[in-house]
Image (cartoon, rainbow, N blue to C red):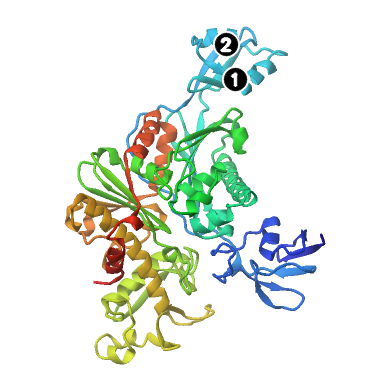
């Protein structure tokens, strides 16, 4: 088969690729990740590149290679980091990691002698530990340190390394990946590192990732990029903390069910087809050699249990972190995102659900939407009769991110600029009812459609930022999915809004939205603001606790089994509840 030379500018990277491959595939091979939030289906229009030979603009995911090409990739089409939440909640735990060390005297390189020193003849030696002992035959050290994991000796290190025991907790989100380096002796978080999930190149949402991973090759690619991403974060943590990766003995990972499956290279096809069952909901312990994680020889990779096809180990980790096992009053924990996950209940009974909210709150399917990047409008309010906005990084406004979208919708609902169905009111009908400055922002954008100008075009801006009727509808679909899920779980307990004692907002997005705006558009139950709390990246905190405490590891397994999963779409009242939740009050 013919192959062609592709050069990417301004990167200066080049490669040979087979005829018929897409420009998107070529970029991926070259190590350049292009923004393809639709998963390469050609529907999002965000992977535009320019062909050097004729200057034409094409979609990288649709343009096939049939000649040598020079390709220019604009910044807008590149995957880049965004504002990422790293902090979470803390819970008092007893530090008792699965990894421990014991100092021993070495009299021979034979395992029997080592077992005698360890005073536990039931211990098993892994191949790595036996290889370590064999390496001592040439020069026997006076003392050595046995590294133990459960009932196994997983490594033997020369000298006394008992004070060097580290682990990494990782939250593999659909959008972001957060890693924490921990001292397993005292539980300290030495540093935190985070980045965007490079799997975004295969699609913004889990359905796109599932579709891409249905083939063996696609799944291998998705696993490869997340393993590389985690290894880069580990390297970054080691450099910043002056810790050797050879002293990191375990990695504990949490993620939604799709992310967990991809990380382990488990089949994902069934996750995208009714009845959406997971290949496995079990916890896994895998040697690093099988996973390609670059930590200590003999190290372990632990993945937390999932609950169901769309309620994963990140929800379990969140439940551990916020102590759902100890809640005596009705508690609602919500992770607002593309795959919104909900837990409602007390320590005696809990229900969980997944809500296919779609990516509107993460900037996708919004005309000028984006993730939380510099220049994105993140706050919208009314001041002196007109709109006031704040952008990330105080840059000129260029897009709107999820928190800004919720604020903007709350403002125009509150001002009566859209009616209870979400439809724009005509400018003529608004005259005299709202301040002139606000009314002037409602403009005809063509095809008998109105839009609302959030930011007029000024110096440093390519164009004004406008919220359209379609954007309003997308936000309604997203908020209705989550609110309907909450209502249907409330019905299981026979309660109304005031029956909920507290709402815990988890996840990166939940911690950047304004509670009053989320409540105003009907995303959250109508509770006093003092009963709505931010708990940060609780999934990351839960993974940290599972890494530090064998009790928390057992608790995670217990909660995964005890939390009752409800398939919202199969509930008889789902359609009517969803339709009701589309409306604004």
Name the residue beneath numbered marker 1: 156
Q: Quadrant of residue 456?
A: bottom left
Give whichever of 223, 416 is nearer the camera. Answer: 223
Q: Quadrant of residue 28?
A: bottom right
Q: Position of residue 247 (x, y in %)?
A: 57, 30
Query: Mark 2 or mark 1, which has the lower sequence index?
Result: 2
Residues at discs 2 and 1 in contact (Cβ within 8 Å): yes
Give whichever of 84, 472 is nearer the camera. Answer: 472
The residue lying at 31 percent from left, 69 percent from top is 582
Q: Position of residue 410 (x, y in %)?
A: 31, 71
Q: Is residue 193 visible?
A: no
Q: Position of residue 69 (x, y in %)?
A: 77, 69
The residue lying at 29 percent from left, 41 percent from top is 324
Q: Looking at the rendering, in which quadrant would you find the N terminus?
A: bottom right
Name the residue beneath numbered marker 2: 114
Task: In the rendered view, tell whether residue 211 sits above or below residue 459.
Answer: above
Q: Position of residue 91 (x, y in %)?
A: 33, 38
Compared across the picture, whether 182 is left or right of 489 comes to: right
Distance between mark 2 and mark 1 Cα atoms:
10 Å
**Crowding near the residue tagged with mark 2, few <14, some 14–19, many ≥20 C-alpha atoms within 10 Å:** many
């Amino acid at each position: 088969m013919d192959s062609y030379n592709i050069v990417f500018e301004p990167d200066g990277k080049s490669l040979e690729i087979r005829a018929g491959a897409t420009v998107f595939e070529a970029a991926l091979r070259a190590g350049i990740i292009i923004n393809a939030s639709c998963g390469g289906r050609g529907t999002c229009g965000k992977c535009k590149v320019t062909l050097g030979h004729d200057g034409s603009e094409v979609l990288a995911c649709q343009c096939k290679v049939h000649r040598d090409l020079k390709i220019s990739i604009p910044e807008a089409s590149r995957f880049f980091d965004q504002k990422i939440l790293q902090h979470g909640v803390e819970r008092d735990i007893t530090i008792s990691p699965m990894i421990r060390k014991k100092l021993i005297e070495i009299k021979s390189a034979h395992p029997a002698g080592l077992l005698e020193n360890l005073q536990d003849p039931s211990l098993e030696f892994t191949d790595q530990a036996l290889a370590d002992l064999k390496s001592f035959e040439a020069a026997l050290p006076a003392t050595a340190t046995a590294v133990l994991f459960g009932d196994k000796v997983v490594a033997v290190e020369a000298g006394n390394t008992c004070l060097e025991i580290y682990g990494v907790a990782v939250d593999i989100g659909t959008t972001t990946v957060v890693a924490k380096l921990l001292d397993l002796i005292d539980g300290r978080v030495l540093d935190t590192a985070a980045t965007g999930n490079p799997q975004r190149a295969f699609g913004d949402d889990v359905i796109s990732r599932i579709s891409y991973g249905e083939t063996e090759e696609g799944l291998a690619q998705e696993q490869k990029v997340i393993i590389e991403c985690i290894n880069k974060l580990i390297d970054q943590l080691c450099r910043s903390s002056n810790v050797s990766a050879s002293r990191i003995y375990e990695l504990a990972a949490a993620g939604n069910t799709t992310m967990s499956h991809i990380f382990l290279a488990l089949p994902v096809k069934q996750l995208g087809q009714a009845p959406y069952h997971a290949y496995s909901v079990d916890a896994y312990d895998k040697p690093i050699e099988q996973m390609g994680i670059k930590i200590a020889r003999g190290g372990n990779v632990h993945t937390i249990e999932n609950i169901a096809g769309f309620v994963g180990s990140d929800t379990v980790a969140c439940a551990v972190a916020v102590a759902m096992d100890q809640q005596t009053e009705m508690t609602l924990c919500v992770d607002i995102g593309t795959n919104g996950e909900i837990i409602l209940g007390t320590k005696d009974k809990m229900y969980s659900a997944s809500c296919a909210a779609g990516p509107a709150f993460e900037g996708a399917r919004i005309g000028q939407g984006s993730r939380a990047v510099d220049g994105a409008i993140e706050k919208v309010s009314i001041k002196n009769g007109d709109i006031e906005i704040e952008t990330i990084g105080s840059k000129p406004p260029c897009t709107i991110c999820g928190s800004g979208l919720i604020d903007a919708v709350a403002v125009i609902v509150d001002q009566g600029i859209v009616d209870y169905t979400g439809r724009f009111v005509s400018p003529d009908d608004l005259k005299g009812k709202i301040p002139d400055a606000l009314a002037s922002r409602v403009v005809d954008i063509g095809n008998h459609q109105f839009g609302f100008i959030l930011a007029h075009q000024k110096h440093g801006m390519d164009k004004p930022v406008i919220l359209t009727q379609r954007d309003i509808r997308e936000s309604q679909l997203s908020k209705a999915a989550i609110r309907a899920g909450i209502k249907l779980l409330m019905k299981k307990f026979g309660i109304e809004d005031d029956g909920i004692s507290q709402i815990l907002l988890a996840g990166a997005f939940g911690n950047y939205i304004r509670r009053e705006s989320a409540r105003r558009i009907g995303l959250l139950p109508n509770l006093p603001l003092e009963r709505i709390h931010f708990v940060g990246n609780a999934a990351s905190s839960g993974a940290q606790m599972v890494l530090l405490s064998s009790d928390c590891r057992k608790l995670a397994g217990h909660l995964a089994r005890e939390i009752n999963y409800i398939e919202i779409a199969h509930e008889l009242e789902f359609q009517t509840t969803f339709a009701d939740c589309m409306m604004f009050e």
